[in-house]
Image: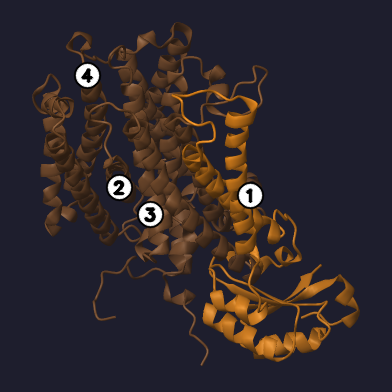
């Protein structure tokens, strides 16, 4: 190799130190004070969610601020936001695997965990938006019911059900398959009998034989190959929810690629928001190195620029279409009552991220952490702008109306953040947060010379 | 070191421990060159060469996954066609009942779903998992197989197996330790 690259993991590690560093956390009996403090806050958030949803089920969705003409608001904004966040996990574990990007190995495990938890949070919104979630099954899933009804398969909303439920299932399966050898490691190192039994059961009796590993590697490669078109299809189908309609601002062919780029952009922002504090708190700097942080910031920059191109094209299409409704929609976005949200999103997603061109910014973890939080906000605003400003002033001025979220909207949204953090903290504490065996393959001990 | 050849009925095989993947691969090559056939290697990380050296054949998993994917695609399409054309035809904006283009997305998703589940379950079932008990776990040192040690086992049911010869051979092949594996 001609180029001298920063190592993926810092020197000084061997198989034993890698195992020790990662396995120590789930196996220790210690609950760090910081962890307890944060999970209490997160649990308070999850409690808020429980209250908001409980009251919603009692009272009905009139609690929420959405009403004609803005019939879709926080519920779909938050759904798209959470699903988008999940995409980075699949990108890291599947697409970067196919491209043999070895640096992904240190971050893939917890990025995948992030995906699963984000999809759980996302699913809450459409399910509760139905008002009677216990009846939602026959609207959403095709199963023979006593009424002889079937879902409307010609609707993108049903495509979305298939896309998201497949995505959730495949993400969990991929994550679990990745965990099997590490569960075996935990089983073999567990001191307490209970942990040995739990991890032993989860490891399915994995022995790491040549046959096992061969099938395992084939299966992983296949799962990566399947997850790649899957992850691209999920946000494409989410964008169909909008693009297949005839609402100005939604009916655009650019939506699928623009949504996928936005999803990856926001997902990497979330990975950075999680990875930066986690590596510092757990002392993982030698495994999640500056190379990872730098690479993730670069991907964020690249996808952010694609999203910026999407904004430019939306404005261009609106003008070039010569449709008065399209032109008015864009004018309303930029100068209407919600103009603040449009310009806030442009200043974050187009202007602020230009800072990422500088290596000094990409390697300043504090600044990057703050920026990643801003990007999360920016991408939330993007969905707000797309959904609310397209609906609040449509074709007939007499039907215009403003949308204001209620306290229940905010409680549900912040509640899902609490639920997400709760699940993520439990994951950090009880599951090896970095793939032990994959990181080992980066070490010289694992290398084997070809036969001559 | 064990001594009695009559223990072979209660013996799963002989296990050798190595320090590196390279040492294990070298030993596996020598073992196969000796004509042993019931051999298995255990490592904490995947080593592609080991399967080629010892088992010499690739898994059928990809073919199963292809079958799973095609089944998923057919399931998705037939389900939608049957529900919207035969079981409960509904006029939506005058569009044809069998508008197959709208059936693409669910069929596509079910293709991936079935294929992925086949890949994961197939990998687990073909490997004989879940299997809580296996003789190799009887060797205490084997706990290191998931950490940083590499192991090679010559099984007692190998026709060429001879307890003393196998032990001596593995020691000669550079093993850091050789253990009997109780069945």
In the rendered view of the protein, which quadrant contains the N terminus of chain A?
A: bottom left
- Residue A268 tag number: 2
Between circles 4 and 2, the one closer to the viewer is: 4
Q: Are marks 4 and 3 on the same chain?
A: yes
Q: Which class describes the residues within 10 Å of circle 3: few (<14), some (14-19), or many (20+)?
A: many
Given contact means CB atoms under 8 Å apart, are the residues at marks 4 and 2 in contact?
Answer: no
Query: Marks 3 and 1, how far apart in space?
Result: 28 Å
The residue marked by circle 3 belongs to what chain? A
Q: Quadrant of residue B19?
A: bottom right
Coordinates of residue A347 in the picture (x, y in percent): 11, 37
Marks 4 and 3, the one that precedes in the sequence = 3
Mark 1, residue position: B71
Mark 3, residue position: A92
Q: Secondary structure at mark 2?
A: helix
- Write down which chain is painted brown: A
Q: Quadrant of residue A208?
A: bottom right
Q: Residue at x 57, y 30 (%)?
A: B84
Q: Secondary structure at mark 4?
A: loop
User: Residue reaching furthest bottom?
Assistant: A452
Q: Which class describes the residues within 10 Å of circle 4: few (<14), some (14-19), or many (20+)?
A: many
Query: Marks 1 and 2, how far apart in space?
Result: 35 Å
Q: Which class describes the residues within 10 Å of circle 2: few (<14), some (14-19), or many (20+)?
A: many
| Residue B124 vertical position relative to residue A259 in the rendered view, above or below | below
């Amino acid at each position: 190799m001609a180029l001298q690259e920063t190592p993926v993991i810092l020197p000084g590690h061997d198989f034993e130190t890698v195992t020790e560093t990662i396995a120590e956390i789930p196996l220790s009996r210690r609950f760090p004070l910081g962890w307890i403090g944060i999970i209490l806050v997160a649990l308070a958030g999850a409690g808020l969610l429980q209250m908001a949803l409980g009251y919603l089920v009692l009272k009905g969705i009139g609690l929420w601020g959405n009403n004609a003409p803005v019939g879709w608001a926080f519920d779909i904004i938050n759904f798209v936001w959470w699903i988008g966040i999940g995409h980075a996990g699949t990108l890291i574990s599947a697409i970067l695997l196919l491209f043999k990007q070895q640096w992904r190995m240190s971050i893939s495990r917890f990025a995948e965990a992030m995906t699963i938890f984000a999809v759980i949070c996302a699913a809450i919104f459409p399910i509760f938006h139905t008002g009677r979630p216990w009846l939602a099954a026959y609207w959403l899933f095709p199963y023979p019911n006593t009424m002889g009804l079937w879902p409307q398969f010609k609707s993108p909303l049903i495509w979305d059900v298939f896309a998201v439920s497949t995505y959730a299932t495949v993400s969990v399966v991929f994550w679990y398959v990745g965990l099997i050898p590490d569960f075996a490691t935990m089983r073999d190192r567990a001191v307490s009998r209970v942990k040995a039994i739990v991890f032993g059961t989860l490891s399915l009796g994995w022995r790491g034989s040549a046959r096992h590993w061969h099938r395992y590697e084939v299966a992983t490669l296949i799962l990566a190959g399947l997850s790649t078109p899957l992850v691209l299809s999920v946000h494409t189908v989410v964008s169909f929810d909008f693009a297949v309609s005839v609402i100005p601002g939604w009916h655009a062919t650019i939506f699928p690629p623009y949504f996928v780029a936005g999803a990856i952009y926001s997902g990497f922002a979330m990975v950075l928001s999680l990875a930066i504090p986690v590596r510092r708190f757990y002392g993982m700097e030698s495994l999640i190195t500056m190379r990872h942080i730098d690479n993730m910031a670069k991907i964020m920059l690249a996808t952010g620029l694609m999203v910026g191109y999407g904004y430019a094209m939306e404005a261009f299409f609106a003008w070039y279409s010569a449709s008065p409704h399209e032109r008015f929609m864009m004018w309303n976005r930029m100068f209407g009552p919600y103009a603040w949200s449009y310009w806030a999103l442009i200043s974050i997603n187009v202007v602020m991220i230009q800072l990422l061109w500088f290596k000094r910014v990409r390697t300043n973890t504090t600044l990057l952490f703050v920026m990643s939080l801003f990007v999360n906000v920016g991408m939330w605003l993007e969905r707000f702008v797309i959904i609310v400003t397209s609906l609040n002033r449509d074709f007939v001025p007499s039907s215009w109306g403003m949308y204001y979220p209620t306290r229940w909207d905010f409680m549900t949204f912040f509640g899902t953040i609490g639920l997400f953090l709760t699940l993520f903290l439990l994951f950090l504490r009880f599951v090896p947060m970095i793939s032990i065996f994959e990181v080992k393959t980066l070490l010289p001990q694992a290398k084997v010379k070809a036969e001559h | 070191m064990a001594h009695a050849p009559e223990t072979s009925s209660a013996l799963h095989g002989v296990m050798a421990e190595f320090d590196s993947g390279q040492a294990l691969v070298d030993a596996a090559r020598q073992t196969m060159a000796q004509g042993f056939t019931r051999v298995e290697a255990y490592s904490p990380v995947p080593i592609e060469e080991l399967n080629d050296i010892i088992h010499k054949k690739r898994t059928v998993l990809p073919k199963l996954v292809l079958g799973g994917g095609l089944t998923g695609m057919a399931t998705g399409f037939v389900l939608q066609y049957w529900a919207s054309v035969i079981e409960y035809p509904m006029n939506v904006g005058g569009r044809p009942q069998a508008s197959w283009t709208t059936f693409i997305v669910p069929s596509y998703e079910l293709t991936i779903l079935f294929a992925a589940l086949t890949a994961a379950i197939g990998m687990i079932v073909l490997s004989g998992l879940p299997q809580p008990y296996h003789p190799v776990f009887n060797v205490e040192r084997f706990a290191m197989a998931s950490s940083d040690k590499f192991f090679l086992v010559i099984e007692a049911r190998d026709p060429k197996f001879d307890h003393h010869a196998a032990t001596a051979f593995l020691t000669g092949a550079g093993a850091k330790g050789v253990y009997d594996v109780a069945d």
